[in-house]
Image (cartoon, grey):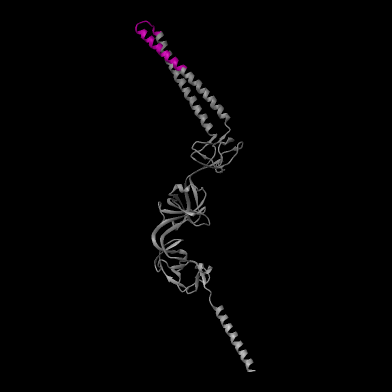
Amino acid sequence: MLNRHFKLLVALLALLAVGAALYTWLGKTKPVEVAVKEINYGTVQNTVSNTRAGTIKACRRAGISPPIGGQIASMPVKEGDQVKPGQLLMELWNHDQLAQLELATSEADAAEANANQACIRADVALRDSYRLNQLKRSNLASDEAVDKADGEARAQQAACAAARATRKVSAAKIRLVQAELERTRLTAPFAGVVAELNGEIGEFVTPSPVGIPTPPAVDLVDNSCLYVSAPIDEVDAPQIRVGMPVNISLDAMAKKRFDGKLRRIAPYVLELEKQARTVDVEVEFLCPEACQDMLPGYSADIEVIIKEQRKTLRAPTEAILEGNSVLLLGADGTLQRREIKTGLSNWAWTEITEGLAEGDEVVVSVDRDGVADGAAAVREAESEK
């Protein structure tokens, strides 16, 4: 009987030991996984960013159409073609103007011939008048003959002047018909790329009615010069000045950053319903050759650099907690809060003026559950191993 009680006591003690061990294991806090980054030296910029996505625009872009209506007779270019200034883009049916030009040219030729004939006669009449006046001095010609010759000379000179005036009228008529003919031809006002064509051969085009915009016949873009247009919040506008350096980033080229310069600040605040009031700015690229692969219409973001510190101690901005503090991963595997003092700051980096040293590891995953001062923690890389 005693042996039986002894065995039950041993079993009970063993069960209690297992329960205590299980309780201890379950009660043990599992370290939280954290992402950390080292404090280092680098550049920190105080910047002002756009409130909404900006847009890459061409320095010159024109939506052009013929000034008169008519039927499209020729379209010697296609979308994507590079054109030169003055190159023909579209021509309307203009056989009537061509016929008028031919008629005006023929009339001008006839007027030129008539003017030459009249002026030759005037020269002959003037010489006859001169000879008769010489003969009169020798009493070899009558006064009546001399007067008649003088009158004839003046009449022929007047006829020459009238013929020359008619020739000028004919030349002006040619220029008028040529101007009317040019209105049927749409040419490139500058070198660029044909971005869009609206119309086909045989279709009719009409000018836009007053106050009613219609799609242009040709959308011509000069993509040799590009810039960024973007809105800046009215609160930030007083800090920026023309000529300030700018960082430019594009969604289409996410791995690249471009240097720019602020070239224009709108002289007014744009007020749009249900949107923050903004000021439009324009930024030019400092390296035009970098724009070769860009297309007008790309979305772009800008950061106007207000102030810059180079080779300064910095920490990721995402690691900065409210009240200017950070969480350090200590050598004992616990998180430690430390107060710091900061200087310049932007969305990526914050300047550290006091409280941290190069090589310190700060937690950047501060929004994870369990991340707090004194908590046990482990680096993500160590956890994965």
| Image vertical order of residue 28 relative to residue 56, above or below | below
At x 58%, y 82%, the residue is 18
Q: Is residue 182 visible?
A: yes
- Quarter of the figure that contains the N terminus: bottom right
Q: Is residue 155 visible?
A: no
List the single residue furthest toward the left. Answer: 137
Residue 53: horizontal and vertical position, in percent?
A: 51, 54
List the single residue furthest toward the top. Answer: 140
| Image vertical order of residue 90 relative to residue 170, above or below | below
At x 52%, y 22%, the residue is 107
In this rendered view, identify the residue nearer to me: 55 or 24.
24
| Image vertical order of residue 284 relative to residue 103, above or below | below
In this rendered view, identify the residue nearer to me: 314 or 167.
314
Asked whether, in this view, residue 115 is left or right of residue 184, the answer is left
| Image vertical order of residue 319 relative to residue 14, above or below | above
Residue 52: horizontal and vertical position, in percent?
A: 50, 55
In this rendered view, identify the residue nearer to me: 133 or 27.
27
At x 57%, y 29%, the residue is 96
Residue 385: horizontal and vertical position, in percent?
A: 53, 68
Indicate yes or no whether the magenta region holds residue 134: yes
| Prevailing secondary structure class for the magenta stretch in the rendered image | helix
At x 45%, y 64%, the residue is 317
Q: Which residues are magenta?
A: 117-144
Residue 233: horizontal and vertical position, in percent?
A: 47, 57
Indicate yes or no whether the magenta region holds residue 105: no
